[in-house]
Amino acid sequence: MLIESSTASGLPILPASANECGCCPGSVSRPTFGITQRIDAITQISPTYLRVDPPCPRSVKIELTARCDLNCFFCATAKRLRTRADMAWELFTRVVREMRDGGVEELGVFYLGESMLCDWLEDAIAFAKNECGYPYVFLTTNGRLATAERVRGCMAAGLNSLKFSFNNADAEQFQAVTRVRGRDFHVIVENIKAARRVRDEGGYNCGIYASSIQYDGEQLEKMQRAVDEIRSSVDEHYWLPLYGQAGLTSGERGTKPIAGNPGRIGALRPPLPCWAVFTEGHVTYDGRLSACCFDHDGRFSMGDLTQQRFLDAWHSEPFQKLRRAHLAMSVQGTACERCIAYE
């Protein structure tokens, strides 16, 4: 069984590991659950959360750093709309402990930046697991800096899920899209393969996954071949649509991004009401609680966690006002207005 039962909030209880699910005692080499099930459980808003003052979110992503080593045209990080810096350790530890005490179960140690650039990534994972008791800690990376050594450190610290954003078909395209040297495409491919070896040889309890943007035509065929090369190294691969990043990258290089953030291909959600406003928290490196997966310019800030407790910000008046607009299926005049989903 992948889903064991349901919580009082209506969300399924997903096992944190093969050991904890009770079906594979003594074996931690391969998880028995998939990342897509966790994603779908968050993007599908249960009735319990569909309100202006929803319960504490089960999942929160917290940004260890706003820096990124790539400059992808489809990501608004490349526009440099905000200062790119690291979160203070003192802020991280306070907020992460506070969120766990409030009921958060799944912690993503990333948001818009590339967490492999953070020197204390392994310490952050260990603190969340050992000091705070998070059942599930997850990480998404572009893979360029995810060397075997860094991956081993993260897994040893207790990481439960490592996902690679694998969005280019070859070295030439990688350089054109990311504006980074093309040969690093091969570095990423080797890092994905090495991650699997590290996990299996060390017996670490960590799922390894990959996602890719699903283009069409010739590009999709190229991506299929690239995915085939890494597929045996991951437990699960899935496809994502091209997002408009809250309207910030709409039409870049002639692309036509999908409306809002409807989740993954195969389980797309309607753009209104947007799940990110109701079921998952997003914390920026400087302590702002954001209402959006793509808050590159700060317009979605719903509270300041350097001054407020997490649950106070989660239930703040600005957040409740925004949710009220989503429930009314009209976000005109709100921070969400510029998103291509509502033009």
Image: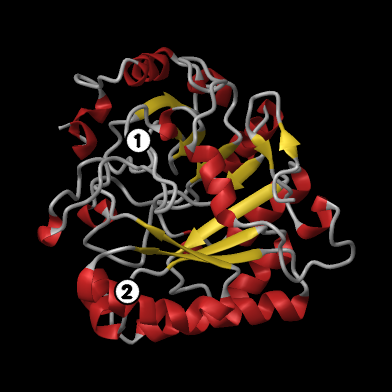
- As drawn, the label of residue 270 is 1
Residue most extreme to the left = 254
Q: In the image, is residue 8 above or below residue 4?
A: above
Q: Is residue 36 left or right of residue 98?
A: left
Q: Position of residue 66 (x, y in %)?
A: 39, 52
Does residue 40 appear in the picture of this structure?
A: yes
Q: State the residue in front, 131 or 166.
A: 166
- The image quadrant of residue 290 is top left
Point 34% across, 21% down: residue: 326
Q: In the image, is residue 217 above or below residue 314?
A: below
Q: Is residue 100 left or right of residue 319?
A: right
Q: In the image, is residue 190 above or below residue 319?
A: below
Q: In the image, is residue 322 above or below residue 40?
A: above
Q: Which type of secondary structure does the marked residue at label 2 adopt?
A: loop
Q: Position of residue 125 (x, y in %)?
A: 65, 54
**Labels 1 and 2: the sequence-earlier one:** 2
- The image quadrant of residue 148 is bottom right
Q: Which residue is mark 2?
A: 168
Point 60% across, 69% down: residue: 235
Q: Which type of secondary structure does the marked residue at label 1 adopt?
A: loop
Does residue 179 appear in the picture of this structure?
A: no
Q: State the residue in front, 133 or 93.
A: 133
